[in-house]
Image (cartoon, rainbow, N blue to C red):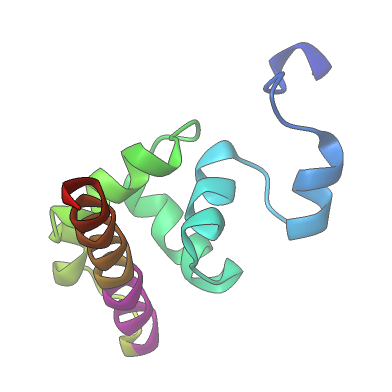
Amino acid sequence: MSEEFPEELTYDLFLEFGVSTRTLISLIGLGLSRTSSIELSNFLGRTHLSEAEVLQSLASREWEALDLPVLVKREISRVIEQKRLEASGAAGIEEA
């Protein structure tokens, strides 16, 4: 089994967050709670998505049609908006 474990991640990281896939770590890394991350993981379907891949998938807004708790949807919207603002802020700094 250890051969299948991603080399760039440690067992400690998975144990710390109580998750079992790279996609879940990416969702948490974006700022979602563990609960929201687990809710979304079934929708995303893939287990090795990076933060950029997860964010791209969430930006499509297909998750809005899912039967997710309102709190989870609100949290996803907050994270997407936060990342959009960070990106626009970074673009503004580059222009200065």
42 lies left or right of 60: right
On screen, 88 above or below 32?
above
Identify which residue is drawn at 26% across, 62% down: 89
Q: What residue sits 20% from the left and 51% below the top? A: 91
Left or right of residue 44: residue 31:
right
Image: magenta residue range: 71-79
Q: Is residue 85 magenta?
A: no
Q: Residue at x 41, y 52 (%)?
A: 42
Considering the whole magenta stretch, tell me its main secondary structure: helix
Q: Is residue 78 magenta?
A: yes
Residue 59 location in percent, x, y?
A: 18, 55
Asked if 36 appears above or below 24 in the picture, the reply is below
Q: x, y percentage for residue 25?
A: 59, 48
- Which of the 4 quarters of the picture holds residue 4? top right
Residue 3, percent across and down?
77, 11
Q: Is residue 9 left or right of residue 68?
A: right
Q: Horizontal and vertical percent for residue 13? A: 78, 45
Q: How many marks?
A: 0
Relative to 83, residue 14 above or below: above
